[in-house]
Amino acid sequence: MSAGHDHSHGHSHSHHHHDHTPKLDHLNTAFIVGIILNSAFVVIEVVMGLATHSLSLLTDAGHNLSDVAGLALALLAFKLTKVNATSKYTYGYKRSTIIVSFFNALVLFVAVGFIGYEAILRFMNPEKVEGGTMAWVSLIGIGINAITAWLFVKDKDTDLNVKGAYVHMAMDAIVSFGVVISGLIIYFTHLYWIDSAVSLIIAIVILRGTWSLLKDSLRLEMDGVPKEINLEKIKAELLKGKGVIDVHHMHVWALSTTENALTAHLVIDPAFVSTFNDIKLDLRHRLEHLDINHSTFEPEFSDEECKRQDC
């Protein structure tokens, strides 16, 4: 019954397509600037952390290093979405964006685990820390993280990886602010356990931000319906098509963190058989306004019995 099914994908429908993918050039720059700034800051933190015996600076350096890796992976995934499809990868490498956003969330969880573990150890055996140095190094961190977060703020809702980078950096600015406060308190009071307390609070803040990223990327990884997609709305839109009597076997999944696909069986009134091409083009256009960039329809005609097992 797949007559018409094979050519239903043939029409070009890319006119609306580019609206969904954030522009690569300015995001490319954002990623590269972010990587350079954060790498420089990691070096500063490691040098100062070793010089002042400050574990929180060294822990934060490790955390920032995971950010640099995250940004680099996100940039790589972004580049891969532009690679053309091949006979082995018929959708190209778009899905790498989903894998990377999932991996980024996992890396953050691991970083949080380390911070929490170190903080608890330090809680029991507080070490002497130079609060003043801690504060001013972290002040630089606030600046660097805030600038990097700002680079992504405009596109954060267009792509899960950009959102991941933005969340990472915004969280890091909060982390650095926490370290500044604890540095000042330690400087004036010599209460060295404050260092660990702040680390634990930071870990909880990061966990909250990471949880939604992990959930969203895992859902896409499992071919779940993307969060912003409303199936009822899509079905209602398909039923508006001329001659469409019913819709079933509707599947929606993510091809990448910015593109979604749909397949559906359409039950067509026999009187409209000859206009199926027009129906298809109309529906495809309607769906593009609902964030579906690739749609494939299989016609079934209401006067024929559906004999297949899954009908």
Image (tube, rainbow, N blue to C red):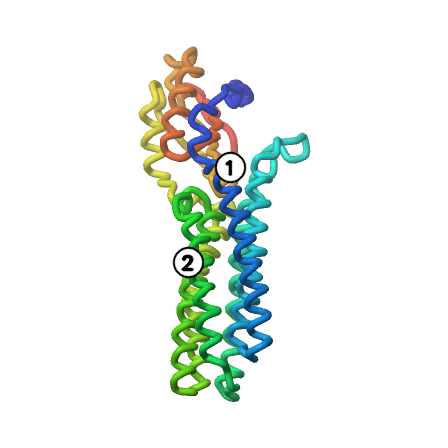
Q: Earlier in the sequence, mark 1 or mark 2?
A: 1
Under tag 2, what secondary structure? helix
Does dot 1 land on a helix, a strand or a loop?
A: helix
Whether residue 238 sits left or right of residue 196 in the image: it is: left
Between 87 and 127, the residue placed more toward the observer is 127
Residue 170's disc is 2
Residue 212 at what x, y percent from top left? 42, 57
Residue reaching furthest right?
A: 88
Q: What residue sits 49% from the left and 41% below the top?
A: 254
State whether residue 34 is above or below residue 258: below
The crowding category of the residue bearing disc 1, from other C-alpha atoms within 10 Å (few below 14, some 14 to 19, many at least 20), is few
User: Which amino acid, mark 1?
Assistant: Asp
With 42 as the anchor, is 216 left or right in this view?
left
Identify the image quadrant of residue 240. Answer: top left
Mark 2 surroundings within 10 Å by alpha-carbon count, few (fewer than 14), some (14 through 19), many (20 or more): many
Q: Is residue 45 above or below residue 35?
A: below
Residue 309 picture location, percent across and down: 52, 34
On residue 41, which mark appears?
A: none
Residue drawn at x 45%, y 62% as measured from the top left: 172
Pinpoint residue 270: horizontal percent, then vertical percent: 39, 15
Mark 1–mark 2 distance (CA, rounded to whole Å):
22 Å
- Taking 25 as reference, is 205 above or below it? below
**Which residue is identified by label 1?**
25
